[in-house]
Amino acid sequence: MAQNIKQLMHNIGERAKAAAKSLAIASTEQKNMALKLAAKSILAAKKDILLANQKDMIAGKEKSLTSAILDRLMLDDIRIKAIATSIEKIAKLEDPVGKIIAKWDVPTGLNIERVRTPLGVIGIIYESRPNVTADASALCLKSGNCAILRGGSDSFHSSRAIHQAFIKGVKQAGLSEDIIQLIATTNRDAVGEMLTGLSGNIDVIVPRGGASLVARVQRDARVPVFSHLEGLCHLYIDRSANLNMAVKIALNSKMRRTGICGATETLLLDEAIIDTHLEPICQALLGAGCEIRGDEQVLAKIKAATKANESDWATEYLDAIISIKIVKGIKGAIAHIEKYSSHHTEGVVANDENVVAQFFNQIDSAILIHNASTQFADGGEFGMGAEIGIATGKMHARGPVGVEQLTSFKYLVHGNGQVRS
């Protein structure tokens, strides 16, 4: 079996590398046509996709998957329509390939251009979100990259159905089906083979999943990695915050969808407003079915709260649970975030411009949000069509990884007979 997986993955890598050459020079019109046809094909295959998803949901419930994971896994008419709409939005984005980022002349008379180019072949390893199959495929296609997709076993049937529909559109546009390949096995040895780089055929690995998956990829990968770490997101409510706004943002940041990486996990409240803001915020959260774990000051005010342990400040719940801590103003909030943050997304609700400036300047997370829900931490909400993930590292790509982040660049140097002395 191990030998079969090794050969399977080797063949996938070779086919992707070969297809990457033609995709890199495909016209914008052909790529956009492929995306539009893929979106249309997914809508046409809605019945098959829902049947496949039903298999995954039944299996997930039998395995006692958490409600957060089941929410990520579940597809319905609205979500399938959203998948197709996201692909259509990506088709409308500016093509990054061939775009001149900068150009200048040097004293020797040479003209130099920095031009965007595809990365090549991108390996994407993800877990329970079947929509990633479509988003990753569309973003890679638009940016001129081939993709090798390895979805999680929990979403195996859903991902296959979405991939089959997507590829139908790709082929109708005259592009090779090898540009987007889905590994049709749940054997974990396939992930190990991907991390080797498939004999130089994979240029970048993008992991999208839990901390254990990302840790394994970072440890074992022999090719560059765009890290997408857990979303241990914080929301700080400052003494200058409007009460109604604070309640609305806190509730949405936590409870709109508890299983996404942009959901707030820890709420930090300025000690100056403990008597005015804490109870209304907590009542809104409790009313929505959220469990509250708080420090001693929270427990003294909110009888329904339970004591927060040290581990709570470092936990990404992905569930209807929030930890709340009272802090000494903006300095206390920054100190807490520096200690516990995964550097994904942090939010501040404040009307004091000095507080906002300190928050933005002193916190080093990929996304910082002022007076809005942390659940806006999403490539689609950023106008990027979609995203493969939120990169929390600092090299090459950071924040939502969209079409531009999936490109590199090269220098084009134009001369007129110059030779170097």
Image: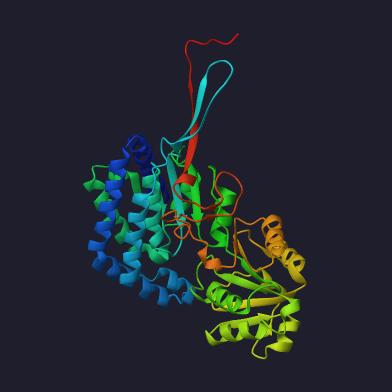
- Up-down: is 29 above or below 386? above
Q: Position of residue 325 (x, y in %)?
A: 71, 76
Q: Is there any visible trace of residue 144 in the rendered image? A: yes
Closer to the camera, 13 or 415? 415
Residue 153 horizontal side relative to residue 172, left or right: right
Viewed as shown, does residue 23 lie left or right of 311? Answer: left
Question: Residue 1: in sight, yes or no?
Answer: no
Query: In the picture shown, does residue 406 fall above or below 62?
Result: above
The extreme top residue here reads 421
| Side of 23 relative to 298 (left or right) | left
Residue 187 appears left or right of 80: right
Q: Is residue 146 above or below residue 328?
A: above
Position of the C terminus, as image quadrant, is top right
Q: Quadrant of residue 210?
A: bottom right
Q: Nearer the viewer, residue 336 or 163?
A: 336
Where does the image place residue 209, in percent across and percent down from the top left? 51, 61
